[in-house]
Amino acid sequence: MSTQKNEKNNNPFKVTIAGIDFKNPIITASGTFGFGQEYNQFYPISALGGVCTKGLTLLPREGNNGTRIAETPSGILNSVGLQNPGVEKFIENEMPFLDSLDTVVIANIAGNTEEDYLAITRRLETVDGVDMLELNISCPNVKEGGIAFGILPQSVEKITKAIKKTTSKPLIVKLSPNVASISDNAKAAESGGADVISLINTVTGMAIDYKTRKPILTNITGGLSGPAVKPIALRQVYECKKAVKIPIIGIGGIMTASDVAEFMIAGASAVQVGSANIFDPKAAYSIVNELTSILKQCKIDSINQLIGSLKT
């Protein structure tokens, strides 16, 4: 349920992205928040600006076998493998709860072929309560030799254009940092019709057990997230802000309200909180409550005054 219905005009934390009003710029990131019900036991998640669902595939997925999580200094490596109940079970079991919330609901979608993405998009198009879609283009395109949809600008533009033709909902394209030029991919998403871009997705890495001389993750490599990737994410948000005119949602190592301010100054209109949710279930809620102090410290009346305000 969009906060547009209940938002007061004098809310200093309100941000509007692609015509959708968020009561504050704090959104939970896909993959670390499930579908929100467990976290709602710790705090009222309607206090958040938005909730982004775990990545949804057309059919249920069990995810990868074996060890799927490894701690690293200032971060987490994961190789979960998009475990999820599939789009139909999501609609049946999770959407009634999400639709009852006074917050923006973003459905993250994933697939291994263009047809997968299109089928999920068509199904979600008819679902009330899904306010926006976020396109996970870090998935391998099995019809193109396993190269991820988000690696090359031409494939970014192609999949974005196809999805945009299929939905009336605002479309967020989530960009991978594991590319030659993220600004080129941002421009490709914009050319394909994306309403918003979000970045960054995880950085590819690995961990080794020196005693066994084996990788810690069964899948060998995984996605690095957490504070370790924040400098990379900030730099890439800044680069994309200069490259595109559409709004940006910043992701990567956000733990505090000051992190939020940094991302917004770099060019983000909102942020997603990911790994912080794993070690502190109330992390996103705490950040929301810290935003008042940011306004005071920066001597501003609206959080929007931070967006793209970097002085160079």
Image: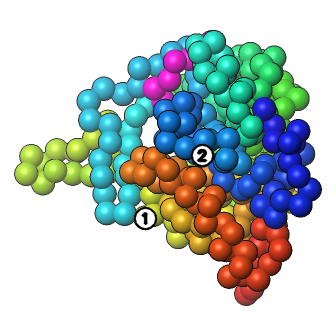
Q: Position of residue 50 (x, y in %)?
A: 69, 44
- SS category of the residue bearing label 2: strand
Colouring of the image: rainbow
- Residue 106 placement: quadrant: top right
Q: Which mark is residue 277?
A: none
Which amino acid lies under the numbered mark 1 shown in the image of this protein?
Ala
Nearest the eye: 290 or 114: 290
Which residue was labeled with disc 1?
Answer: 228
Quadrant housing the C terminus: bottom right
Q: Residues within 10 Å of mark 1 (few under 14, many from 20)?
A: some
Q: Position of residue 222 (x, y in %)?
A: 38, 44
Quadrant housing the N terminus: top right
Q: Position of residue 32 (x, y in %)?
A: 49, 41
> Relative to 112, is 132 above or below?
below
Which residue was labeled with disc 2?
Answer: 28
Nearest the eye: 143 or 258: 258
**Which residue is at a point 53% across and 70% down the rendered structure image?**
231
Q: How many marks?
A: 2
- SS category of the residue bearing label 1: helix
Nearest the eye: 190 or 146: 190
The part of the chain drawn in magenta is: 82-88
Chief secondary structure of the magenta portion: loop
- Residue 108 placement: quadrant: top right
Q: Position of residue 214 (x, y in %)?
A: 16, 44
